[in-house]
Amino acid sequence: MQTTLLEQETALTKEGQAEQAPTIIDKTTRSITLSFLVGCVTLIMTGFAIIMPVFPQRLHALGLGAETLALMEGAFGLGMFLFSTPMGTLAGRLGRKPILLLSLGGYIITNLLLVVVNTPLLFVLIRFVEGMVISGLMPASMAMVGDTIVPEKQGRWIGWLTTAQATGIALGPALGGILSQMLGLTAPFVLSAAIALVASLLALLFVPETLPAQRRTAAISRTVKRETSRSHNRPTSLGGLIWLFAPFLLIDFGLIFTYPFVFPQYPFFFEKVLHSTAAQYGLILSVFGLALAIGPLVLGTLSERWPNKLLIMVGSLLFGALNVVMFLAPLYPLLIVGAALAGLGCALAGPALGGIYLGATTDANRGQVMGLRGSAISAAVMLGPLTQALVGHWITPQMTFAIGVALSLAMVLVAFLLLRLPPQKEAV
């Protein structure tokens, strides 16, 4: 399979290069804007993670079981999968800030509704709506980075967003567990909604709209597609964008699919084969999360010195380190090293991929492309556990880990064969 994505996307006229230029705001305002954006993402992901350990307890208190929890999480993933692309498209028509506020506001409402409902159907429906509204958060956030930051600096800021996500997910569960024990099962949902309210106020007051007004007007009047087609000869239909970005979507899907696929085997393998304690298993997950959180801070400057293609290949290779150790030599010290390398690999590959996406988009299609990426990631999160459930009875844990290693190596090969790096853009 060959791709000419980056050749097509970077064969720009002077007019096209001007369109690619970041929104003109002064450096201080830009830094403040993106800093608040990172803070908003940290808050919302913390609030998101706070309620995760409470769901099983709340369902159990209502006489509901694992089946309801599985349906709820499946509905949440389905909502994200179905609406990531439409939300990204709306971010290119209405603006980034309205979608950001819609995601935060919708999350507040759904969290408060989860406090009062007590039937399985309503739990499932609310989680679907929650996945639907929250699906606009990252496409809008990523598009804001692309709108305001020059390409060579985008990887660092995408890394900050990655750190924000990982930090929130790391802090949230512990906080949720403590709150549920001290104040009851409804307290985490109320606090999660309150955190989202704070994030909404920060976004409303301190995060400006980054999509130029003329681009929003053109998109609403449906002239963007005709203008872009005449000026740059670039496909703007959904199918055309999927084809052009297929290699990136494939790598995103492959990397994200890997761990949801192998993850269900981890706790049983640690307990029954390695005879490890829950604390030892938890430490492995914590090391992975810590490496993912601090990796962009330590490795952020690499995105400005190394080609994104190389970062994606190295990151994909490191991402499989934990599965390599699980398959070949599951010794606990090596498992800790493998978890750290896997987290660092994710911290390398994710921002590099994001940088290539943003570098190959324009104001007109940036939100939609980021939505496509969100859909690919959501599909991987949904299909990974489902695939393991379908084949888990037929394969051993070691075979599962081997498949995980093979998937990581396959993504390295895909990156090597299919990604074409853009030439350096001339200054406008």
Image (cartoon, rainbow, N blue to C red):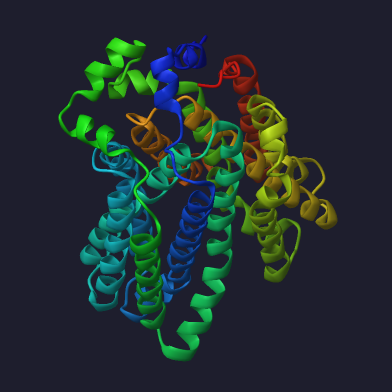
Residue 298 lies, in percent from the top left, at 73, 50
Query: Which residue is at the far front?
Result: 26
Residue 217 lies, in percent from the top left, at 20, 35
- Is residue 394 something that shows in the picture? no
Check the image and report above or below for 79 versus 377: below
Q: Is residue 83 left or right of residue 50?
A: left
User: Which residue is at the front of the view, 381 or 44?
Assistant: 44
Q: Is residue 288 left or right of residue 20?
A: right
Query: Which residue is at the far bottom?
Result: 182
- Counting the numbered discs, the total is 0
- Is residue 157 something that shows in the picture? yes
Q: Quadrant of residue 233?
A: top left
Q: Is residue 222 left or right of residue 75?
A: left
Q: State the residue at coordinates (28%, 10%).
A: 230
User: Which residue is at the front of the view, 170 or 154?
Assistant: 154
Q: State the residue at coordinates (32%, 46%).
A: 78
Q: State the residue at coordinates (25%, 68%).
A: 109
Residue 426 lies, in percent from the top left, at 56, 18
Q: State the residue at coordinates (30%, 41%).
A: 91
Q: Is residue 343 left or right of residue 142?
A: right
Check the image and report above or below for 235 versus 276: above
Residue 145 lies, in percent from the top left, at 48, 42
User: Which residue is at the front of the view, 324 or 96?
Assistant: 96
Q: Quadrant of residue 18?
A: top left
